[in-house]
């Protein structure tokens, strides 16, 4: 009777191992965010928000955004990551070659890390223009209205629908984009990250309307992104939400005009 090696035994539980790793990664990200929010609530943020920022401030914002993206986006990417892990194991059984699933995850997170650098830069710019409150909320009704209308309109855009369709079909994506080796897995993760970014980038800008460190709204957006990807009517979920966002933005603009 053939006995399984420790590696083979582990691979048979690959989905559980990967799912556990994703859960731990997400939990650590949210722990960091809650800890940071508690620190911000305990200190006087007005002084730190009044001075001119430098590259050190940008770096801290970048870290905050990068960890926030991990907490928000890993849950919605989990179905595709687990699909990759399953096919990866089958490839190993056939060829004996194995690539860690977390290479794929690293490629995915590289996209959101790059986005985080841009988001931190945008926040720096808004701070320089005195458009942000100490709690990182836009003080400009005009900016809020523009962001809401833009986010709502993008929910109806063809690019949004194309990217969402790729994100809604994990098996189709993995089979059509499969590449062998470490570089192949990294590139697959990067490509999926780009499609995911194409789905969600404008929604992330809404954090400036609701509060970058308003964790209730961070959670709401994260859950909404997940529902868009897993619900059969995800496209219509996006469109209905887009109409509501545009209406909200127009209402805010009318308030300014009044």
Image (spheres, rainbow, N blue to C red):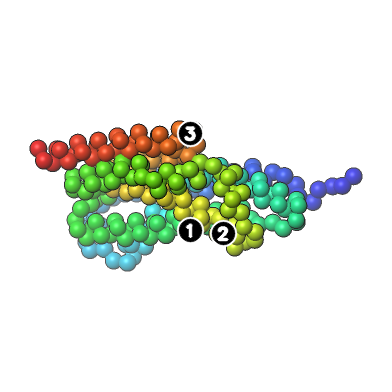
Classify mark 1: residues with Cα within 10 Å, few (<14), some (14-19) or many (20+). some
Q: Of callouts 3 and 1, which one flags the residue occurring earlier in the amino acid sequence?
A: 1
Q: Residue at x 71, y 48 (%)?
A: 90
Counting from the top left corner in percent of width and height, residue 172 is at: 58, 45
Disc 1 on helix, strand or loop?
helix
Counting from the top left corner in percent of width and height, residue 240 is at: 35, 33
Instruction: Report how far apart the C-alphas of labels 1 and 2 lie in the structure.
Output: 9 Å
Residue occupied by mark 2 = 186
Residue occupied by mark 3 = 231
Counting from the top left corner in percent of width and height, residue 252 is at: 19, 39
Mark 3 or mark 2, whichever is nearer to me? 3
Q: Residue at x 19, y 56 (%)?
A: 130
Q: Residue at x 18, y 47 (%)?
A: 142
Relative to 123, 171 lies left or right: right
Check the picture and name the quadrant holding the C terminus.
Answer: top left
Relative to 16, 246 lies left or right: left
Instruction: Report how far apart the C-alphas of labels 3 and 2 lie in the structure.
Output: 27 Å
């Amino acid at each position: 009777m053939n006995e399984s090696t420790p590696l083979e035994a582990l691979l048979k539980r690959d989905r559980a191992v990967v799912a556990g790793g994703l859960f731990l990664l997400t939990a650590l990200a949210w722990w960091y965010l809650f800890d940071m929010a508690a620190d911000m609530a305990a200190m006087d943020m007005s002084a730190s928000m009044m001075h001119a920022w430098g590259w050190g401030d940008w770096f801290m914002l970048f870290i905050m955004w990068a960890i926030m993206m991990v907490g928000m986006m890993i849950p919605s990417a989990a179905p595709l990551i687990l699909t990759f892990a399953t096919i990866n194991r089958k490839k190993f059984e056939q060829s004996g070659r194995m690539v860690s699933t977390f290479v794929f995850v690293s490629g995915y997170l590289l996209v959101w890390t790059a986005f985080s650098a841009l988001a931190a830069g945008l926040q720096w710019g808004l701070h320089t223009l005195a458009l942000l409150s100490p709690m990182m909320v836009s003080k400009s009704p005009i900016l809020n209205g523009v962001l809401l209308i833009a986010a709502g309109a993008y929910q109806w855009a063809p690019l949004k629908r194309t990217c969402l369709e790729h994100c809604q079909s994990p098996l189709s994506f993995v089979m059509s984009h499969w590449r062998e080796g470490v570089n192949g897995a990294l590139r697959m993760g990067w490509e999926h990250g780009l499609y995911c970014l194409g789905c969600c980038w404008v929604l992330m800008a809404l954090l400036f309307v609701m509060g970058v460190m308003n964790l209730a709204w961070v959670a709401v957006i994260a859950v909404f992104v997940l529902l868009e990807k897993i619900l059969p009517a995800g496209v219509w979920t996006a469109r209905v939400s887009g109409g509501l966002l545009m209406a909200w933005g127009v209402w805010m603009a009318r308030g300014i005009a009044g």
